[in-house]
Amino acid sequence: DGELPSWPSVVAAGLDPAPLGELCQELRSLATELGLPGYTLAISKAGRRAFLEASGPMSLQRPEREVDVNTLFRLFSMTKAIVSVALMTFYDEGRFDLDDPIADFLGDAWR
């Protein structure tokens, strides 16, 4: 619909609503074109949520039910990829070294 995100958090976070609106419109178009179910898009800046949008059907079999920002998604084996990205982000921030013993983080039970 070409609507620009107008949440105060977008502007307060220093984000430009215009490209964000274009991104949302493009995501909606791609999801429709590719026949994908709904999604949630969250953007954070400096550790704070600056933008949150949900769009599309919960299921392609039941398109009358729309996702919202509180919809829970089944991730199945995607958790491995998500945890890997989180860990490498912490590594890039210098929070740990790849050679650090796991017991340093998980306690003596992991020795």
Image (cartoon, helix red, strand yellow):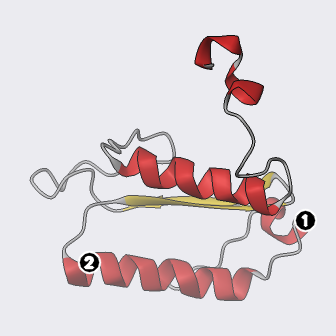
Give percent across and percent down for residue 26: 45, 86
Position of residue 76 in the picture relative to residue 97 (left or right): left
Q: Which residue lies furthest to the left in this view?
A: 61
In the foreground, 107 or 30: 107
Position of residue 36 in the picture relative to residue 28 (left or right): left
Q: In which quarter of the image is residue 12?
A: bottom right
Of the residues shown, which amino acid type is indicated by label 2? Thr
- The residue that appears at 43% across and 48% down in the rendered structure is 80
Of the residues shown, which amino acid type is indicated by label 1? Ala
Q: Residues within 10 Å of mark 1 (few under 14, many from 20)?
A: few
In the foreground, 44 or 99: 99
According to the picture, the residue beneath numbered tag 1 turns out to be 12
Image height of 74 relative to 8, above or below: above
- The residue that appears at 72% across and 48% down in the rendered structure is 99
- The residue that appears at 70% across and 52% down in the rendered structure is 98
- Tell me the number on the disc at residue 88: none
Label 1 to label 2, Cα distance in Å?
31 Å
Q: Which of marks 1 and 2 is nearer the N terminus?
A: 1
Label 1 secondary element:
helix
Q: In which quarter of the image is residue 3?
A: bottom right
Give percent across and percent down for residue 60: 15, 58
- The residue that appears at 33% across and 62% down in the rendered structure is 56
Label 2 secondary element:
helix
| Quadrant assignment for the C terminus | top right
In the foreground, 107 or 12: 107
Position of residue 24 in the picture relative to residue 27 (left or right): right
Give percent across and percent down for residue 81: 46, 55
Image height of 63 relative to 29, above or below: above
Give percent across and percent down for residue 23: 55, 83
- Tell me the number on the disc at residue 32: 2
Counting the numbered discs, the total is 2
